[in-house]
Amino acid sequence: MGEMCHQVMAQIVGHDTVNRFHRLRLLVPDIARNACPGQFVCLFPDDGDGLPLSASLNVRFIMPRPFSISDAEGDEIEIAFSVVGAGTGFIARLGIGDSIRVLGPLGKPFVWRDGHDVALLVGGGIGYAPLPFLARTLSRMGVDVVAIVGARSFDELPVRVTQKRVLEIGGAQIAADEFARHGVPSAIALEQPHFGSFHGTAVDLALEWLEANKHRRVAVYACGPREMLKCLQRILIKRAIDGQFSVEERMACGLGLCFGCACKVVEDGKEHYRLACVDGPVFDACTLIL
Ligand SMILES: Cc1cc2nc3c(=O)[nH]c(=O)nc-3n(C[C@H](O)[C@H](O)[C@H](O)COP(=O)(O)OP(=O)(O)OC[C@H]3O[C@@H](n4cnc5c(N)ncnc54)[C@H](O)[C@@H]3O)c2cc1C
Ligand code: FES
């Protein structure tokens, strides 16, 4: 656990939904002040003593559930998630005023390296989650940032749609409010056509944007389904573009103890295992074996 990592009972100060996706705001001053984009927190769906919060819930949660820090400001952080099992189902039922034990910030953040002149952020589905915090941070640093969010259909979009700050590419006429609120232009790619969106995947639109911005030194930051990262990785390698991916491997302890999150990377021409929770979740795009 890093020096700056804290375990606290966090109060829920906001909970809203977009389609089937939840967004929670947590009051966690020590975590919020130390968090960097790309890092994550672990939520313990219990009452703080390892016991289920709700007596009606006969599942005993032992392992924490990791979530990217989707945004951080002042004393608060935001997480965005979809319900996939018992843990996320439990967290989705928390309301304003409830508390949950939170550990963080954990993991290695995204980094901005000199020598680039624009950041392209690509999020696939709920994988967009770590990117608004990155957008906020980079734009405050004065970096030129643009974002693309992809989903299967309009009903599967995890972000709120706006007509402000639309990224002019692929005929897009709608943007994501999660980026617009940080002054960052974005576009939405949907596999099922919908008014105002680009028709195709997030990677198709990213390719179109990269083609139109060939002359620029781009750094790509992405998070999403493995297939999306694989396609994007092929493009980045072919075009020798720098990128960083956040991989959301299955995790258990979140602390480098259980080896439940091992993933393969190639470094110095050799394959190595790395732990997504402590060596990641952010890795150089081209080193990952996906
Ligand atoms: C570093 C990191 C950051 C993450 N950030 C987010 C985020 O911002 N938003 C979000 O919605 N989810 C995120 N996840 C995934 C999230 O942690 C899992 O969805 C959650 O732990 C599932 O818990 P559960 O008890 O509801 O599901 P379980 O009962 O444990 O599992 C139910 C189903 O979910 C699948 N599942 C479990 N864990 C994962 C996982 N890590 N990735 C994909 N599928 C999984 C299982 O295969 C199973 O089918 C992140 C994971 C990691 C490792
Ligand atoms: S989750 Fe236990 S080592 Fe990474």
Image (cartoon, rainbow, N blue to C red):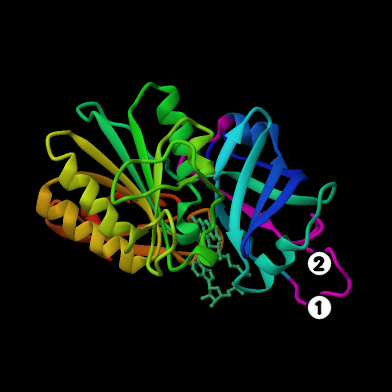
Residue at point 53%, 53% (across, down): 255
| Residue at mark 1: C-beta within 8 A of ligand 1 | no
Q: Position of residue 162 (x, y in %)?
A: 52, 44
Vertical relation: 101 (above or below) 142: below
Question: Dot 2: few (<14), some (14–19), or many (≥20) neighbours within 10 Å?
Answer: some
Task: State the residue lying farthest toward the right.
Answer: 55
Q: Callout 2, which amino acid?
A: Pro
Q: Are the residues at dot 1 and dot 2 in contact (C-beta closer than 8 Å)?
A: yes
Q: Which of marks 2 and 1 precedes in the sequence?
A: 2
Viewer-side residue, 10 vs 144: 144
Q: Position of residue 40 (x, y in %)?
A: 53, 48
Image quarter where the N terminus lies is: top right
The residue segment tinted magenta is 34-60
Which element is circle 1 on? loop
Q: Point out which mark residue 52 bears.
A: 2
Q: CA distance from mark 1 to mark 2?
A: 8 Å
Residue 67 visible somewhere in the drawing:
yes
Task: State the residue lying farthest toward the bottom.
Answer: 58
Q: Main secondary structure of the magenta part?
A: loop
Indicate yes or no whether the magenta region holds residue 14.
Answer: no
